[in-house]
Image: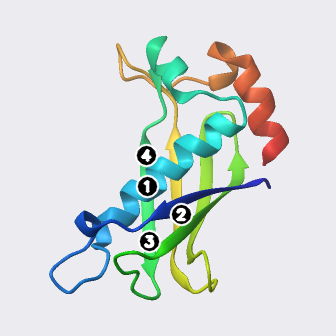
Amino acid sequence: MQVKTYSHKVLYRDCDMMGVVNNAVYVHLMEDARVEALNSLGLEYKKIEEQGYAGPVLSLSVEYKASARFGDEMEISVTFERYTGARLFLSYEMRDKATGKLFATAKSEHCFIDLKTGAPVLIGRVFPSWDNILKEVT
């Protein structure tokens, strides 16, 4: 299991009226961290979309542990948990970069599809290099 990290400074727009990061923002940060983690492995998500494929979210769960606030430096760790050839399972930890305080944990499950038909595809058939790398990191 390989872990990749992504940093985000909490912006004013990330916060709700209570001055804490809105719960929906965590999902956006997970997406940013996931795309960056893939890119860091040489798996440019943009390239598969340009060739007519995508990796949509099948399921997502988030557990909120503590409130992040405007100005906090968050570090989002993405762990490549499991890859079956058809599905990719990731986990996330969102922490305060300075103190290590845990803000949230999460899990997501993804498949790969043909954008024209919406049909699932085995990534190894259309992007063998992705298949090899994902097998190595999980």
Dot 3 falls on a residue whose secondary structure is strand
Q: Is residue 67 above or below residue 136?
A: below
Q: Nearer the viewer, residue 37 or 82?
A: 37
Residue type at tag 4: Val
- CA gap, disc 1 to disc 3? 10 Å
Q: Amino acid at mark 2?
A: Lys
- The amino acid type, in three-letter code, at marker 1 is Ser
Q: Based on the displayed image, in which of its 4 quarters is residue 84 positioned? A: top right
- In this rendering, which labeled residue sits more in front, label 1 or label 2? 2
* Residue annotated with mark 3: 62
Nearer-N-terminus badge (3/2): 3
Circle on res. 57: 4
Kindly indicate whether the residue at mark 4 contacts the one at mark 2 (C-beta within 8 angstroms).
no
Q: Quadrant of the N terminus?
A: bottom right
Nearest the camera: 11 or 109?
11
Q: Earlier in the sequence, mark 4 or mark 3?
A: 4
The residue type indicated by label 3 comes to Val
Residue 76 in percent (x, y) is at 57, 64
Tell me if residue 27 can be seen. yes
Q: Which residue is mark 2?
A: 107
Could you say which quadrant of the image residue 129 lies in? top right
Counting from the top left corner in percent of width and height, residue 86 is at 61, 34
Badge 1 is on which residue? 59
Q: Position of residue 14 (x, y in %)?
A: 28, 66
Cβ atoms under marks 1 and 2 closer than 8 Å = yes
Residue at 49% from the left image edge and 34% from the top image edge = 55
Q: Earlier in the sequence, mark 1 or mark 2?
A: 1
Q: CA distance from mark 1 to mark 2?
A: 8 Å
